[in-house]
């Protein structure tokens, strides 16, 4: 995986548009990348790969800022942070690809499938049924891919 | 407080538009009301009071559905539910009055001020700075009213 | 259809997470289910079926709260309620599956295709062209499936 | 009122930025203005007045396009159009000033206060409680200003 | 192309619902149509074609109001207007089809691919990563269709 | 002003929650702060000041990420970036305080008042009249405070 980090960092360094000094970047980038692969390595690689020919800096900001800064913060643990993320993405709407990533991430860091379902259902009074239905159908697909049963899963 | 419950239930029964049978209503309504006063009694009373001359059933639905159904559900505890709520309301935008209620509610059920702040800051990558700034300024006002210091509070 | 109601109610009773007493549930659930099949039986069954392995309570809330409470209310008739629903879903955005259900529902309760189109076009000044274009293309698909011509249909 | 139309049209003609020919404009503008004063003369004048020093063409587009085109359309009557408008503005959120105008407009064209309340409450399942609460409090203020009681008003 | 304008205008004249006088319409419509084909002829035709059997007036309003009024305005040139449009559609969310049209339009009027990417990335602090990721993936598809490399393109 | 930077950096260093190394922070922070004071010094100071007792890291992220990264990027100049920002905030809705900051910022970096107005009006077809009206009234207030006339101002 170290190899992958290097190659991504390299492909980003090749980008036409670079403002961070190599040293500055590599610290925050590597810290973010470590957190990202802890949370969802496969989706992380896939997103960075898909961005590298169009907007590599967008991938860099996701790694450096979202994972290198926000996901490094104390006070809330990773499971609480995924509850907050799932609620934000459910409410935002139109963010089904990101919701899929973060439902997987939630399960990866220890949320149970029923906890994911509960976080989504809890949004009903605040964001209404359509956003919640869309989010639940994303969760259903993730659960099927991982062969998890949200009605019996105990984590 | 029991007296208040009764009087509210009564004023709702007087409403022109009633579909639930008294028995059905009183069970779910009282279950919801108990949860609501556990979470934020003062705001609950204030909202129901302000609705009773314009749309008392809206108050009834908040009590019966949001608090009598959703907030009764298992799997997530009340602190986790307030993290999810704060994230949803921050992301929704334009919901500052409701955010004020639920930041208070979060503190009432045991979230610390730093946990409230973290839940809001965690939304930056998903909903951007403007929504997060608006939410933080609501939190600031709540903390000042309660004389809580979010930089030193340990819960 | 009675058989289906029973089987759905049964599968929900099997659910791990149940808060309503059977009597309470069956009254509101059956009242809601009657309204739901009056409005759009096929979509109702399909949505409940798709939820039953992931979040059966979400289907129950749709039936009990949306159809057992809100759609039972007086003052506005079912056609007016579908105009309001179509406007809300057009404006919300990202709710194309729900919009498809409710455009069908609108036609089922007596709205003409031109009335559906007008409700969507009326949203242009409030929500802009993109949301309205997306909604019109959903309507177009529904009209084609039902072989209705919105330019000549008289209801 | 005719005098006012003339003076507004005049002040718009003075605007630095004008693309419509006088004849084209005056037809659609006057048609729109007639509809606007039919719906809510006072708010219409107030909005146009407040725009005339900053963006008079915005006022012109509201008159020409919203009222001169959309509100001229057949199939739905003015009361149905205000139901659709109230739903759109409730769902949009952050549009309280416009909601105030259109709740007044709804009452002006013959909606009863209970119909306005019902249109807003009907949005709960689609847009959640916060948007609906905000809209109901706008309605409450309008009802108070007009001394209308939404619990007893029969239109 | 003149032929197409005529045939579209004709099919619209056949529409059941017509409020503009032929003269009024043809002036603004033709002015708008000229601007539309200057900006994105292919998408313009495709959208109007797809609307003509369901809501031809929606296509007419896009041509007359969006392109015949707004896009005729002075002060900002077409490239600046496409920057503003791309930002609005990125932020709105759920408007991927319209974003595809306007990224093409931006390139057609002289924006470079890197300028399109920058306009989208600039929205990160205001609307968050999910909306920006969705928009960038639309841009990626457009760039691929046009065989443009956003990392080396100089316009 | 240097003195102010130092004191803010200092108060942030005192924050309980710090992840960036001092060197890393001071580079990006100072780079961002220079850009921020170039764009809108007064609002920048006011926002950071108001955050320092509740969430100083939020102010730090605004400086480091928004101004230290995004606003440092090439390809679009500061005036183009403010056009994009004004469009994003108009469309987002409920971001009036941030819109006020960025309309001021736009004027500070060389946009004329008519250009600000045009950027807002250009959003009408995409986001509808209510968001545009709200944004124009913010612009009107800013123009009045700065004694700028948007109908005659030539920059």
Image: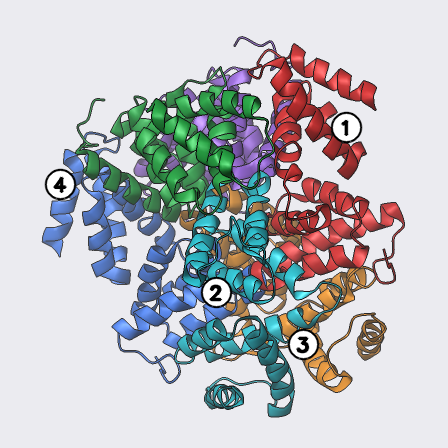
Chain colours: A cyan, B red, C green, D purple, E blue, F orange
Q: Is residue F11 left or right of residue A134?
A: right
Name the N-terminal-most of marks 2 and 4.
Answer: 4
Residue at mark 4 to residue at mark 3: CA–CA distance: 57 Å
* Chain to which mark 2 belongs: E
Q: CA distance from mark 1 to mark 4?
A: 62 Å
Determine if marks 4 and 3 fall on one subunit. no
How far is mark 1 from mark 2, CA to CA? 41 Å
| Residue at image mark 3 | F32
Where residue E54 sits: x, y (%)?
22, 38
- State the separation of the CA atoms marked 2 and 3: 22 Å
Would residue F11 be found to the left or right of residue B30 on screen? right
Residue corresponding to mark 4: E10
Residue drawn where x is 60% and y is 84% of the image: A30
Which quarter of the picture shows residue B78?
top right
Numbered disc 1: secondary structure = helix
CB within 8 Å, label 2 to label 3: no
**Chain on which label 4 sits:** E
Q: What residue is at 23 percent from the left and 33 percent from the top?
A: E21
Q: Residue B132: x, y in percent?
A: 66, 57
User: Nearer the observer, disc 2 or disc 3?
Assistant: 2
Checking the image for residue E132, the label placed there is 2
**Residue F15: image x %, image y %?**
83, 70
Residue A34 seen in this snapshot = yes
Q: Is residue D52 visible?
A: no
Q: Circle 1 is placed at which residue position?
A: B45
């Amino acid at each position: 995986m170290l190899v992958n980090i290097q190659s991504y960092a390299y492909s980003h360094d090749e980008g036409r548009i670079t403002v961070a000094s190599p040293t500055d970047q590599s610290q925050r980038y590597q810290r973010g990348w470590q957190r990202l692969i802890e949370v969802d390595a496969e989706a992380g690689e896939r997103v960075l790969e898909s961005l590298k020919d169009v907007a590599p800096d967008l991938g860099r900001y996701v790694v450096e800022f979202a994972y290198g800064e926000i996901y490094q913060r104390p006070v809330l643990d990773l499971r609480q942070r995924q509850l907050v993320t799932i609620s934000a993405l459910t409410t935002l709407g139109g963010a089904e690809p990101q919701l899929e990533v973060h439902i997987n991430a939630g399960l990866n860091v220890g949320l149970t499938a029923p906890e994911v379902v509960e976080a989504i259902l809890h949004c009903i009074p605040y964001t209404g049924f359509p956003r919640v239905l869309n989010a639940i159908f994303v969760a259903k697909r993730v659960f099927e891919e991982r062969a998890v049963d949200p009605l019996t899963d105990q984590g």
